[in-house]
Image (spheres, rainbow, N blue to C red):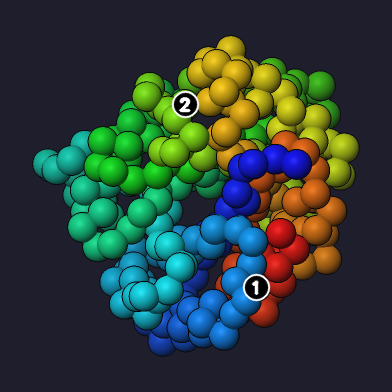
């Protein structure tokens, strides 16, 4: 049995106004208060506009809050961007970097993702580093190579199991309703861990959490979370409903 404590992280993406986000956060905090708590760490990553009300709504609970992205610099002339120090100042403990939607919509490359992750660590945040292949890459038989390459290029220097989480998100399974089979997910997660052994050593690789992030839902979470190298989930759509997110957490 793995000693790694599972992490269920909700990525709300660009969804929610103040009333929605506050209600969602309060609903999750109420679930935690009612107990018993699921056997996992819980995290929500709201859009930047909702971080303050969400932090306030979950104060005193075991629910952590994170940002969906951050800049690689602490401050400066970067209109529209948010530094890791700003996230930490608001009460965030995590920052997602390198999500496929950032890589696609903003043409982010591995070097930028690595710089953001290192900035997150420097600010005392835990970096969730996202990697994953497209459908074309999977069909071309490039899945393992693409993920190894992105991992090597994106993993921050100084990464440890305490400050870094890896999230495998097959791009073809994000928001599509398609999901990797348990065998497909385990194959990639095992390959990621093998690469982490090369990069960080066996002990650190054994302790680092690798999340699955492709259409995890209440009806498939238990099977995916039972896999030996799947240490949690990076949840999109299902994190926007208290019942669905809580059901996934209970699957741990």
Return the residue nearer the eye: 49 or 23: 23
Q: CA distance from mark 2 to mark 1?
A: 30 Å
The residue mark sitting in front, 2 or 1, is: 1
In the rendered structure, the answer to whether residue 220 lies left or right of residue 165 reads right
Picture residue at 36% right of the left edge, 75% below the top: 60
Give the label on residue 83, or none: none
For disc 1, the marked residue is 246
Asked if residue 207 is positioned above or below residue 240 in the image, the reply reads above
Q: Tell me where residue 205 appears, x and y as whole percent.
A: 58, 26
Residue 159, given in percent of the width and then of the height, sits at 42, 28
**For the point 83% across and 66% down, which residue is it?**
219
Tag count:
2
Q: Residue at x 64, y 41 (%)?
A: 3
Residue 211 is drawn in which quadrant? top right
Q: Secondary structure at mark 2?
A: loop
Q: State the image coordinates of residue 194 (x, y, percent, origin top left).
A: 67, 20
Judge whether residue 238 can be spotted in this image.
no
Lateral position of residue 54 relative to residue 98, left or right: left
Can residue 139 be seen in the rendering of this structure? yes
The residue where tag 2 is placed is 155
Residue 150 sits above or below residue 94 on the image: above
Q: Nearer the viewer, residue 12 or 91?
A: 91
User: Does residue 78 appear to the left or right of 169 in the view shown?
Assistant: left
Q: Earlier in the sequence, mark 2 or mark 1?
A: 2
Q: Nearer the viewer, residue 143 or 85?
A: 85
In this rendering, position of residue 115 left or right of residue 20:
left
């Amino acid at each position: 049995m793995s000693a790694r404590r599972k992490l269920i992280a909700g990525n709300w993406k660009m969804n929610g106004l103040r009333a929605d986000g506050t209600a969602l956060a309060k609903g999750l905090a109420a679930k935690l208060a009612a107990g018993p708590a699921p056997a996992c760490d819980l995290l929500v990553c709201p859009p930047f506009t909702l971080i303050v009300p969400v932090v306030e709504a979950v104060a005193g609970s075991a629910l952590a809050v994170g940002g969906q992205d951050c800049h690689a610099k602490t401050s400066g002339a970067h209109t529209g961007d948010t530094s890791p120090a700003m996230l930490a100042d608001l009460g965030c403990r995590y920052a997602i970097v390198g999500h496929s939607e950032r890589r696609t919509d903003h043409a982010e490359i591995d070097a930028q993702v690595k710089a953001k992750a290192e900035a997150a660590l420097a600010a005392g945040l835990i970096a969730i580093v996202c990697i994953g292949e497209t459908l074309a890459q999977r069909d071309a038989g490039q899945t393992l190579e693409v993920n190894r390459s992105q991992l090597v290029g994106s993993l921050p220097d100084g990464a440890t199991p305490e400050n870094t989480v890896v999230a495998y998100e097959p791009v073809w399974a994000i928001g599509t309703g398609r999901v990797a089979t348990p065998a497909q997910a385990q194959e990639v997660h095992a390959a990621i861990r093998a690469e982490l052994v090369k990069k960080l050593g066996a002990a650190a690789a054994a302790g680092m959490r690798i999340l699955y992030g492709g259409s995890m839902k209440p009806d498939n979470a238990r099977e995916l979370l039972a896999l030996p190298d799947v240490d949690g989930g990076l949840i999109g759509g299902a994190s926007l409903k208290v019942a669905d997110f809580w059901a996934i957490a209970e699957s741990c």
